[in-house]
Amino acid sequence: MRYLLALVSGWLLFANSALAWNEFGHMAVARIAYREMGDGLKVRIAKLLEEHPHYKDHLSKLCPADVPLAEWAFLRAATWSDWIRPKKDDPRGDRVTGYHRPGDHYVNMPIAADGYMDVVRDLKSDPDVQDIVGAFRQRISEAKLRSATKGDRAVAICWMSHLIGDVHQPLHCGTLYSSIFPDGDLGGNRFGVTVEGKGVKLHAFWDDALGKADGWESDSTTRQAKLYERLKEIDETLRDPKYGRDKMQELTKNTTFPSWVRESHELAVRVGYREGKLRGAVVGFNTPVPTDAPALSVEYVATAKELAKVRIVLAGYRLADKLKLALPKD
């Protein structure tokens, strides 16, 4: 484990289009953080986000009529880092997609199975390549920097919100090496399984574990209003005392961003891949999963969904805490 943790700064084996949590999951993290913040901090963040280069294009866009604009912009800020991802023949151009930094979203610490520890030992990382740990360090520094422009600090806040969400998705901190994945499974993006008879990649299953956010292809104010109602519903569920700060031992045990990476990696090993024993099919990155791929058990699905709630709550608490440190009172 010491050796694996030493690689945390260099693993960039994920494909550029990999996500961590879907839109719903990232907004749920932000919703929890928002209710954890005091009014003064909310005002400071709102003023900075108004200076964001995409405030009108994304942050404030599609705001439901009954939702305060400051809250909505904060929720949408959590999804901005995925919104800027280039699409095929993207008409938005460099004004939007120029902000995209694909390697900042993850760190693929290797997971060895089937006697593949020797393969993992031979892997070499590039210390000069950026990953999520370096990215977060850079972004929180920018958010704190009073000499930076308000627009740059607003961009940094968006990245902070998104990266804290990303790092709490276990499969964003691990990639499996085994007899069927000698070159790694790209964080579950080549690991095919079925759930209720439908093929899905393991990474995508975890992204959607809290709930899906369908309809993004034809987004609208109506869709966002429905999404906000679902956010309120899940937020009420996550107010259960069992998700309270006093029940989250990780908050005091792991207080740094690298320790959160280790936390997720350990969950990827133990829960995500079941110590390398989880069965799956090899799937091309851009190909569908066959319906005869091994099925996830009912117990696995239930465990993943509950763990997703805990990870989302932890991410929300930690986001609020980091923003308090980054944006203290003047």
Image (cartoon, rainbow, N blue to C red):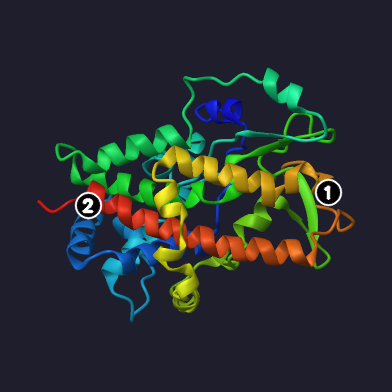
Specify few, some or many for label 1: CA neighbours under 10 Å numbering under 14, 14-19, or 20 or more: some
Determine the residue located farthest toward the left in the rendered image.
330
Residue 204 visible in the snapshot: yes
Q: Position of residue 226 (x, y in %)?
A: 49, 78
Q: Which amino acid lies under the numbered mark 1 shown in the image of this protein?
A: Arg
Find numbered disc 2 in the image and state the secondary structure of the residue it sits on: loop
Q: Nearer the viewer, mark 2 or mark 1?
A: 1
What distance separates the C-alpha of mark 2 from that of mark 1? 48 Å
Find numbered disc 1 in the image and state the secondary structure of the residue it sits on: loop
Based on the displayed image, in which of its 4 quarters is residue 176 positioned?
top right
Residue receiving disc 1: 279
Counting residues from the N terminus, which is met first, the one under dot 2 or under dot 1?
2
Q: Residue at x 60, y 56 (%)?
A: 207
Q: Is residue 4 above or below residue 81?
A: above
Q: Which amino acid lies under the numbered mark 2 shown in the image of this protein?
A: Glu
Q: Residue at x 33, y 39 (%)?
A: 139
Residue 60 visible in the snapshot: no
Determine the residue located farthest toward the bottom in the rendered image.
66
Q: Is residue 108 above or below residue 315?
A: above
Determine the residue located farthest toward the right in the rendered image.
292
Which sits in the foreground, 40 or 76?
40
Q: Residue at x 82, y 48 (%)?
A: 280
Which sits in the foreground, 264 or 137?
264
Asked if residue 223 lies left or right of residue 160, the reply is right
Which label belongs to residue 51? 2
Based on the displayed image, in which of its 4 quarters is residue 11 positioned?
top right
Quadrant holding the N terminus: top right
